[in-house]
Amino acid sequence: MSKIILGGGLSGLSAAYYGINKFPYEVITLVEKSDRVGGWLKSVRQDDGSIFEQSARTIRPSGEAGANTLQLLNELGLSHEIVPVLRNSPAALNRMIYVNGNLHILPNSLGSMFRKQKPFSKPLYRYFLNDVVAAKKKIVDNDESLYSFVDRRFGTEIADYLISPMVCGICGGDAKEISVKFLMKSIFEKEQEYGSVTRGLIANFLNKKETAPREPTQLEQRANAEKWSVYSFKNGIETLPNALRKDILSKGVKIDLNQDIQEIEVHKKSILMKRTDGTVLVANHLISSIPALNLAPLLKKDHPYLSDILSTFETASMCVVNLKYNKKLLRQDGFGFLVAPKENLPLLGVIYDSCCFPHEDSTILTAMLGGFKFNTYFNEKTTAEEVLNIALKNLGKILNISDQPDNFKVSILRQCIPQYTVGHSKKISLIENYLSDNGLALSLCGASYYGVGVNDVILSAKKAIDEL
């Protein structure tokens, strides 16, 4: 018996980890197209010891998926590598948006909900009261855009100043296209059932069923006691995929790098994976963690219906610019700021890395550009130098930073973030039904399907293995 895991990103590595622990006597092979594992997670250490992150840099400890990741870290022996950002630190409390030509700190306490605070024209609690009186609306096909949902329940300012920038920060997406189920599935479903979010939450509280208490892991207990907001690692986020790689290799998983796959035949009890060099890999099951758009053409010959659905999944491209200045430049400590899309800038947001993880007498920033606006401001011929100049121009405008960076790195990441547009959940149901109805030896995990965050892709891998 053997299994193949396609894709060596975080989800593929996690699938290999869970797979070899569940099936210790089976042959498990991880197949990766590039010359390294880890996918988009990449931490680049500079000569001065600072770390530039290419994509994600922090992980949230909360929720089912967060608890699962903490358990994984505990098993990998990474507890001593964790560097948390505490909930009472400026990096956790001060999250800003740039809108109407100015930076604004978002309300960050219960008391601030009852005060008028720019850019909002009234205290936040009044927007949420709007949900109580807003008309009930039954949505066709049981899905709508996140922007539309928030706009009709809480008002345009919440949609423009909170939700739209947040979606840009999470996935580089357009809230007017992203499905409400991407971030607010439970709230949306309660609203559809009870007529308002408020009534739905009240009903949920009154009808809440008792569940057996779960004993938190040692690392969860530490995160709760120390009040972690988010966390990373001493040597950057790539610590996690590196630890997974080391662990699965020690347990006998084979990692095949630089593998170009031409076609995949998926049957009920077997799969055949054809390389472009003519050789064939055979296994009794395939777990694919690669992007849906990359998997689609590989299945086209034998499963055109499935291939067609996968080919409709959307992605966004990003430019990431890491900057280091050998002096303190920020006037306000915080996690960073996001740019409201209505500002019509190529910049999506800036993370204050040196505030989250302090560096003595220096300022480290990460600027994110493009996303759903990538094709408006960039193209195939855009150079790293042009991206850097655009980032510096926007930093000058928003943060009044005119200094040239002492060190920098520009990464242009094409088609790097899946976009869960309206109808995404319906596509997932169609795919799951097709795989189940045909009894195919194929499982899917990764950012294309069940969440784009670090916690999400790890949990999706675990569930794929658990269901085998």
Image (cartoon, grey):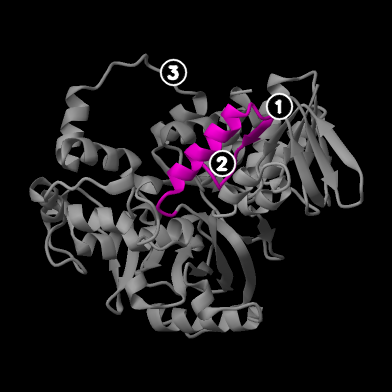
Q: Is residue 182 magenta?
A: no
Where does residue 354 sit, x and y in percent of width and height?
50, 62
Q: Residues within 10 Å of mark 2 (few under 14, many from 20)?
A: many
Q: Quadrant of the N terminus?
A: top right
**Amino acid on which disc 1 is placed:** Lys
Residue at 40% across, 32% down: 224
Question: Which residue lies at the image location 55% right of the left edge and 39% below the top edge?
Answer: 431
Spatial CA span between label 2 and label 1: 25 Å
Confirm whether the magenta stretch covers residue 435.
yes
Quadrant (top left, top right, bottom left, bottom right) of the C terminus: top right
Please state which of the two labelled residues, at mark 3 or mark 2, is closer to the viewer: 2
Cα–Cα span, label 3 and label 1: 39 Å
Q: Residue at x 49, y 44 (%)?
A: 427
- The total number of labels drawn is 3
What's the amino acid at mark 3?
A: Glu
At horizontal 24% and vertical 22% (from top left) the residue drawn is 208
Q: Farthest residue in the right direction?
A: 278
Tell which circle, 3 or 1, labels the residue nearer the N-terminal end: 3
10 Å crowding of disc 1: few (<14), some (14-19), many (20+): few
Q: Is residue 98 above or below residue 283?
A: below
Vertical relation: 368 (above or below) 391? above
Given residues 97 and 50, the one toward you in this image is 97
Tag nearer the camera, 2 or 1: 1
Q: Residue 186: where, in percent of width, then height?
A: 31, 38
- Residue 268's label in the rendered image is 1
Q: Which residues are magenta?
A: 421-449
Let me know if residue 65 appears in the view: yes
Question: Residue 457, which numbered label?
Answer: 2
Q: Which residue is mark 3?
A: 215
